[in-house]
Image: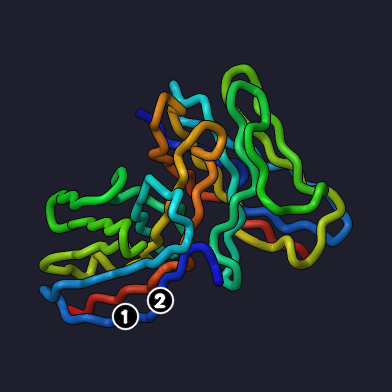
Amino acid sequence: QKEVEQDPGPLSVPEGAIVSLNCTYSNSAFQYFMWYRQYSRKGPELLMYTYSSGNKEDGRFTAQVDKSSKYISLFIRDSQPSDSATYLCAMSEGNGGSQGNLIFGKGTKLSVKP
Amino acid sequence: KAGVTQTPRYLIKTRGQQVTLSCSPISGHRSVSWYQQTPGQGLQFLFEYFSETQRNKGNFPGRFSGRQFSNSRSEMNVSTLELGDSALYLCASRTAGRGDTEAFFGQGTRLTVV
């Protein structure tokens, strides 16, 4: 079992839809949780960063972390064609020397159709 | 504020050769991590440098090495290139302050080994 599991999709939705992206993980020591967006032939761009359990909202994006279930989610409201990209979840134990070692899911490819 | 800069953007090398990639972190960031991204394996951690010292290392062979200079710029070297080394190589920088793990990525160097 991989440390972080993420459905690769592809996921296709109409413009304006609510998108739900998810990751599960096995390492209970993970404390920091991130979502990155990666456009084709570009580097990953940090979208959301959450410490421990709870929700965080930023504009149309909401990140949720449920450490008891080892499950994290990213919701995109009012999705736009410009949201079409690959979304990567990433996690870290965040202690001492392991902070720089992010464990990534394989990414979910999202397509938002006009 | 300038982002993470990676050079070169594209490289084509022959099997058996060696290659050096460069990463300039965001000003004030002291940690640089390197990742390899392939379609099959996704993003995988190579190593992290902090204050010119390797702080953490992923599960890659010794052909992959790196270093960091006093100005936090980092280089990554791959010797005796193999076809399987073809990938997008990404570096990420962090402030590496206490409890901080927000990592910002560069655009990557796409290496093709022929």
**Mark 1 Cα-neighbour bin, 10 Å: few <14, some 14–19, many ≥20:** some
The residue closer to the viewer here, B20 or B10, is B20
Q: Position of residue A93 (x, y in %)?
A: 46, 44
**Mark 2 Cα-neighbour bin, 10 Å: few <14, some 14–19, many ≥20:** some
Mark identifier at residue A7: 2
Q: Extreme front residue here?
A: A68
The residue closer to the viewer here, A30 or B3, is A30
Residue at (81%, 62%) from the top-left corner?
Answer: B82
Q: Position of residue B47 (x, y in %)?
A: 64, 42
Q: Mark 1 or 2, which is nearer the eye?
A: 2
Q: Is residue B77 left or right of residue B55?
A: right
Where is the N terminus of chain B found, in terms of image quarters? top left
Q: Position of residue B30 (x, y in %)?
A: 51, 25
Tell me whether circle 1 and circle 2 mark residues in contact (CB < 8 Å). Answer: yes
The residue closer to the viewer here, A2 or B103, is A2
Chain under disc 2: A
Q: Is residue A83 left or right of residue A98?
A: left
Q: Where is mark 1, residue-wise?
A: A11
Residue A63 visible somewhere in the drawing: yes
Where B62 sits versus A6, above or below? above
Q: Quadrant of residue B55?
A: top right
Where is the C terminus of chain B found, in terms of image quarters? bottom right
Chain under disc 1: A
- Label 1 sits on a secondary structure element that is strand
Report, in whole angstroms, how far the alpha carbon at label 1 lies from the one at label 2.
Answer: 9 Å
Q: Position of residue A113 (x, y in %)?
A: 22, 80
